Amino acid sequence: MGKKLILYLSHCGSSIGGGEKQLAYLATNIDQEHYQPLVVCPDDGVFVEHLRCADIPTVILALPSWRKMKSLIARYRAVEKLATLAKTHNAKLVHTSDSWFNPYLCSLKKRLEIPVISHVRTLLTTAQVRKYKFNQMDRIIAISQKSKTALIQAGIDARKIDLVLNCVDLDAFQSLDRPERSTEYVVGIVGRIEPFKRQKEFIEIAAAVVAQNKDVQFHIIGAALNTPEHRAYEQDIRQWVLKYQLQEFVHFRGHRTDMPNVMQELDLLVTLSAGSVIAEAMATGKPVIGTPIGSTTEMIVHGVTGYVVPLDPIDGIANKIIQLANDPIRSMRIGQAARKHAEEAFGIDMHVQKVQDIYQKLLTIS
């Protein structure tokens, strides 16, 4: 029997976020004796180039918003092109890395009679589950128990949902001893500068910490998209740095593509929006402080590999940062435990095998 082609729909081709990283891990490590990945991206750019460098075939095809009336004709044309692409390459299964593409999967399923999988990376409301036709998916992959529970509460059959945690390249993200340097303790937040990532709250936390410990530095790693909304949000953040007089303590590091090096520069990661950065920091031997949203509570072992602390009031997170900054040996030991946990829970091989098991079941049935 020949290879079975898996058609992937990616949210983005021009930048690399957490979802794109996870898709790349899967596509580049899948058993290529049995499966052939083909990734559809809506635009060209760094993610597409990353896939091409890894010899993963890609196709650029814009998939307009399904529900906007002005996109009706463009949507119809996109469906036709996508169906033709799937037929031409004899796709056996379609897997979207972004649930907002579910309507396109439904169309392909109906036209081509092939199984479809939707990957859920966020918490969804009941209205969103209905809006994006999750009931028509053959399988759904959730990255957290919270996401899975939300789907079940919205009426999705639990037997259709698989829980697969995010993974990380344990070889690329190594726990290394850093060269000796000053006594400053470096806390970072990583991600695109946007309201969802809550960099504003990170500034408030920094202000509360600096008021008690001026040996802590804060790094904001990431950049804003070139849109009015995102540019305005970044400007607000910079104004807040001035408002709290944190110019000597808060540093904007911009967009970085060398994430293993970024993590090595930190003593502690703070995330206020969950995501694969948790696994990356832990694999690098860094403790992580997160809030009880998304997959955070399932990735961080509270009190062992880091802490899960409510965002409100911000003093809760600020106090944990101060405790770790004041006790670097404790911080280091938590980081060591984080690396060990990452090795046990976030390996790529285990992640890919779980997804391949889902593929095998669906393709056997079909």
Image (cartoon, rainbow, N blue to C red):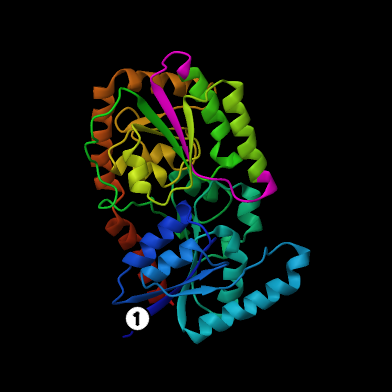
Q: Is residue 287 magenta?
A: no
Q: According to the image, label 1 marks what residue?
A: 3
Q: Which residue sits furthest top?
A: 212
Please name whichever residue, 297 or 244, is drawn nearer the observer in this view of the structure: 244
* Residue 333, image quadrant: top left
Please name whichever residue, 265 or 100, is drawn nearer the observer in this view of the structure: 265
Which residues lie in the magenta part? 210-229
Please name whichever residue, 43 or 89, is drawn nearer the observer in this view of the structure: 43
Compared to residue 140, the image places residue 107 above or below, namely below
Compared to residue 27, the image places residue 33 above or below, namely below
At x 29%, y 30%, the residue is 304
The picture places residue 336, in percent across and down from the top left corner, at 23, 35
At x 62%, y 68%, the residue is 63
Please name whichever residue, 55 or 118, is drawn nearer the observer in this view of the structure: 55
The picture places residue 120, in percent across and down from the top left corner, at 50, 54
At x 58%, y 48%, the residue is 124
Quadrant for the C terminus in the image: bottom left
Compared to residue 152, the image places residue 36 above or below, namely below
The picture places residue 49, in percent across and down from the top left corner, at 45, 67
Mark yes or no: residue 59 visible.
yes
Mark yes or no: residue 361 visible.
no
**Image side of residue 23 versus residue 137, left or right:** left
Looking at the rendered structure, the kind of residue marked 1 is Lys
Quadrant for the N terminus in the image: bottom left
Name the element at disc 1.
Answer: loop
Mark count: 1
At x 38%, y 69%, the residue is 53
The picture places residue 142, in percent across and down from the top left corner, at 46, 53
